[in-house]
Each structure stands twice: as structure tokens, then as C-alpha cells.
Image (tube, rainbow, N blue to C red):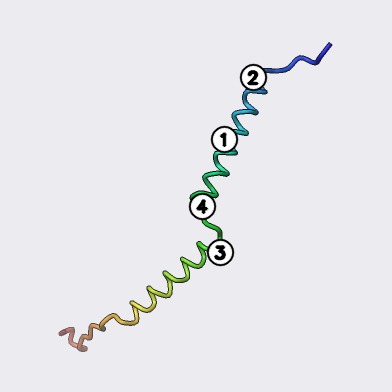
């Protein structure tokens, strides 16, 4: 005689597998690699530094006049 099967456990395992497959598909479709994220972050930081270098300085005298 065959071993009894717990249908709840089987159903939950199937649901987990489907959820993981959907998550993997979304990661491929929408996700970016760590290298791509780091590259974007570095480019954004360089752009901010470049823009900060072009800001006009506001000078004030010692008496507080502008």
C-alpha cells in the first residue's frame, strides 16, 4: 500500500514553486544587476560633483553686507 500524501503540504509546495518561478521571471524582466546599479550610482555622483563645481559663490563682507 502507498504512503498517504498530505494534500495541504503538496498544495503549499506547489504554490511556493509557482511564486518563485514568477519572482525569477520578474527579476529577469525588470531587475538590474549589482554592476548596473553601481554604474548608475557612480554616474549620478559624478554629475552632482560637476554641477556643484559650477555653483556661484555668494560672498559676504565681514560686516554682514552682501
Q: Secondary structure at mark 2?
A: helix
- Left or right of 8? Residue 51 is left
Task: Name the quadrant containing residue 33.
Answer: bottom right
Q: Secondary structure at mark 1?
A: helix
Q: Residue at x 52, y 56 (%)?
A: 32
Q: Residue at x 51, y 52 (%)?
A: 31
Disc 4: which residue:
31
- Left or right of 8? Residue 30 is left
Q: Secondary structure at mark 4?
A: loop
Q: Position of residue 30 (x, y in %)?
A: 48, 50
Q: Position of residue 44 (x, y in %)?
A: 42, 69
Q: Which mark is residue 35?
A: 3
User: Of marks 4 and 2, which one's residue comes earlier in the chain?
Assistant: 2
Disc 2: which residue:
8
- Report crowding for label 3: few under 14, some 14 to 19, many 20 or more residues within 10 A (C-alpha): few
Tell me whether the residue at label 4 lies in contact with that at label 3, contact meaning CB atoms closer than 8 angstroms. Answer: no
User: Of marks 3 and 1, which one's residue comes earlier in the chain?
Assistant: 1
- Left or right of 63? Residue 31 is right
User: Of marks 2 and 1, which one's residue comes earlier in the chain?
Assistant: 2
Outermost residue to the right:
1
Disc 1: which residue:
19
Outermost residue to the top:
1
Where is the C terminus found, in terms of image quarters?
A: bottom left
- Real-space CA distance between mark 2 and mark 1, rounded to the nearest whole angstrom: 16 Å
Q: Residue at x 52, y 63 (%)?
A: 36
Q: Secondary structure at mark 3?
A: helix
- Real-space CA distance between mark 3 and mark 1, rounded to the nearest whole angstrom: 26 Å
Amino acid at each position: 500500500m502507498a504512503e498517504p500524501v498530505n494534500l495541504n503540504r503538496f498544495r503549499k509546495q506547489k504554490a511556493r514553486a509557482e511564486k518563485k518561478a514568477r519572482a525569477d521571471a520578474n527579476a529577469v524582466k525588470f531587475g538590474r544587476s549589482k554592476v548596473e546599479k553601481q554604474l548608475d550610482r557612480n554616474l549620478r555622483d559624478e554629475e552632482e560633483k560637476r554641477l556643484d563645481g559650477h555653483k556661484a559663490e555668494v560672498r559676504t563682507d565681514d560686516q554682514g553686507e552682501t
